[in-house]
C-alpha cells in the first residue's frame, strides 16, 4: 500500500507540472483505434516430443484420447469436466480491443545543446475497451536528454465473465474447478522504467538514414484486489498465471523508417518475467514444475503503413517461446497441476493488426 500511494503521489505531481506549464506550449494529440489479433491453434505445449519449433495444429486433442492421461494422476477427469481442457480449439482464437488516446507534450528543462534542446515531458491517458474488460492506462514520459526517456505510469480496470465464450476478463484462478470462482473487482498496474532510443539520421542526416533502435525496460507491480498472497488470477482472458507481484517487461525495436507510405520496416520483441522471489521460485522449470521462472518472449517482423489523413495501420507477424508439459498433466485446466519436461519450443503465435486515426 505504501508503494501504491507513493506512485500515485508521484504521478499526480508530474501531472501538476504539466498544468502549471503555459497552455500555449502544449502539443496536443488525440487518436482512436483498434487492435485485432488472430492466434494460430496448437497443442499448448502438450504434444509428445521435444522439437525446437512447434508447428500449428488444427486437430484438437481431448483427455480421453490420451493413454498417458487416462493412466496418470488425474485420470478421473475426462472430456468436458471443469477440471480439464482440450489441447487446441480447432480454429485458434482472436483478440479485439478499441481505444482512445490523449497525449499532451510540452517543453521541460530545455537546454541549449543538441542533446537537450528538445527536452520535454509528455502525459498520456488511454482508455481501452475489450469484450471482457475495460481499463485505463496513464503514463508520464520525461525526456531529459535526446536518447533517453524516463517513464512512470498507473493502469487499472475491471473485467467480467463471458459465459457463452467461456472466458474471464478478471477472476481468481486458484483451484481445479473455477465454475464458481470470485470474479470482478479491480486489477492495477504500477510501473517505472526507461527507454534508450537512437536514430542514425541524428548523426548522419538524410531522409533515407532513419535506422532506429529502441529499448524500453519497465519494472511493474501488478495487483488484483481479490487475490491473496500466492493466489493466481485471470486478466483479459489470458492464461490465468498472474500473481500480485513484481515483474519485468521489456519492449525492443530495431528498424528502418523510409520516406514511403510504408514508413516503418523492422523487428519488434517483448520480454517478460517475474521478479518477486516468492513467485519466481514457486515452481521452476528445473524442478519439473509449471514454469514460474520462465522468461516469456514474443517477437517478429512489423511494418507500419501511412494510410493518409492521420490513418495508420501496423501489421505484425509474431512468434513466441514456450515449454513442453508432460502428457500426464497437460490436459489439466489449472496450470499449477502441470509438470514441465524441461524442453522449450518456439511457435508461430499470432497475426496482429493495429489501426489508429490521429485527429
Image (cartoon, helix red, strand yellow):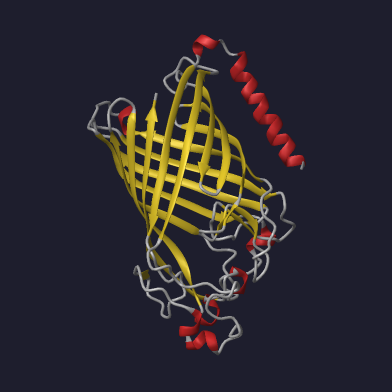
Of the 4 image quadrants, the one containing the N terminus is: top right
Front residue of 98 and 28:
98
Q: Is residue 244 above or below residue 357?
A: below
230 left or right, relative to 109: right
Between 219 and 29, the residue placed more toward the observer is 29
Q: Residue at x 55, y 81 (%)?
A: 78
Residue 199 falls in which quadrant of the image? top left
Residue 33: % across, % down: 42, 35
Question: Can see residue 205?
Answer: yes
Q: How many marks?
A: 0
Please indicate whether residue 90 sits to the left or right of residue 274 in the image.
Answer: left
Is 2 located above or below residue 132 in the figure? above
Question: Quick check: 181 left or right of 235?
Answer: right
For residue 113, which quarter of the picture?
Answer: top left
- Most extreme residue toward the right, as rendered? 2
For the point 63% across and 61% down, the residue is 280
Nearer the observer, 233 or 260: 233
Residue 30 drawn at (x, y percent): 45, 25
Snapshot quadrant of residue 229: bottom right
Q: Position of residue 40 (x, y in %)?
A: 37, 61
Instruction: Name the residue at 57% across, 42% down.
Output: 134
Q: Is residue 284 visible?
A: no
The residue sitting at 56% across, 33% down in the picture is 139
Amino acid at each position: 500500500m505504501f508503494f501504491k500511494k507513493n506512485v500515485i503521489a508521484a504521478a499526480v505531481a508530474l501531472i501538476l507540472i504539466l498544468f502549471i506549464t503555459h497552455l500555449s506550449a502544449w502539443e496536443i494529440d488525440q487518436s482512436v483505434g483498434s487492435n485485432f489479433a488472430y492466434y494460430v491453434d496448437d497443442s499448448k505445449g502438450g504434444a509428445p516430443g521435444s522439437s525446437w519449433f512447434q508447428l500449428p495444429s488444427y486437430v484438437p486433442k481431448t483427455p480421453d484420447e490420451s493413454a498417458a492421461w487416462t493412466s496418470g494422476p488425474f485420470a478421473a477427469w475426462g472430456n468436458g469436466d471443469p477440471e480439464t481442457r482440450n489441447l487446441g480449439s480447432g480454429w485458434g482464437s482472436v483478440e479485439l480491443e478499441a481505444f482512445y488516446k490523449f497525449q499532451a507534450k510540452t517543453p521541460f528543462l530545455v537546454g541549449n545543446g543538441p542533446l537537450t534542446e528538445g527536452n520535454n515531458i509528455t502525459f498520456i491517458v488511454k482508455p481501452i475497451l475489450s469484450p471482457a474488460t475495460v481499463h485505463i492506462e496513464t503514463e508520464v514520459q520525461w525526456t531529459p536528454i535526446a536518447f533517453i526517456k524516463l517513464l512512470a505510469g498507473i493502469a487499472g480496470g475491471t473485467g467480467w465473465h463471458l459465459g457463452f465464450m467461456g472466458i474471464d476478463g478478471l477472476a481468481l484462478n486458484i483451484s481445479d474447478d473455477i465454475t464458481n470462482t470470485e470474479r470482478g473487482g479491480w486489477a492495477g498496474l504500477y510501473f517505472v522504467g526507461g527507454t534508450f532510443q537512437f536514430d542514425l539520421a541524428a548523426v548522419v542526416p538524410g531522409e533515407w538514414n532513419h535506422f532506429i533502435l529502441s529499448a524500453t525496460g519497465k519494472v511493474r507491480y501488478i495487483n488484483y484486489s481479490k487475490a491473496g498472497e500466492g493466489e493466481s488470477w485471470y486478466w483479459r482472458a489470458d492464461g490465468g498465471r498472474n500473481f500480485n507481484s513484481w515483474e519485468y517487461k521489456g519492449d525492443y525495436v530495431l528498424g528502418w523508417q523510409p520516406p514511403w507510405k510504408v514508413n516503418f520496416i523492422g523487428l519488434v520483441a517483448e520480454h517478460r518475467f517475474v521478479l518477486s522471489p516468492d513467485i519466481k521460485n514457486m515452481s521452476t522449470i528445473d524442478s519439473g514444475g509449471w514454469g514460474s521462472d520462465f522468461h516469456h518472449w514474443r517477437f517478429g517482423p512489423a511494418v507500419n503503413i501511412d494510410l493518409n489523413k492521420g490513418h495508420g495501420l501496423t501489421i505484425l507477424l509474431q512468434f513466441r517461446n514456450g515449454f513442453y508439459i508432460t502428457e500426464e498433466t497437460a490436459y489439466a485446466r489449472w496450470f499449477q497441476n502441470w509438470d514441465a519436461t524441461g524442453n522449450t519450443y518456439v511457435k508461430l503465435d499470432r497475426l496482429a493488426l493495429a489501426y489508429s486515426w490521429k485527429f
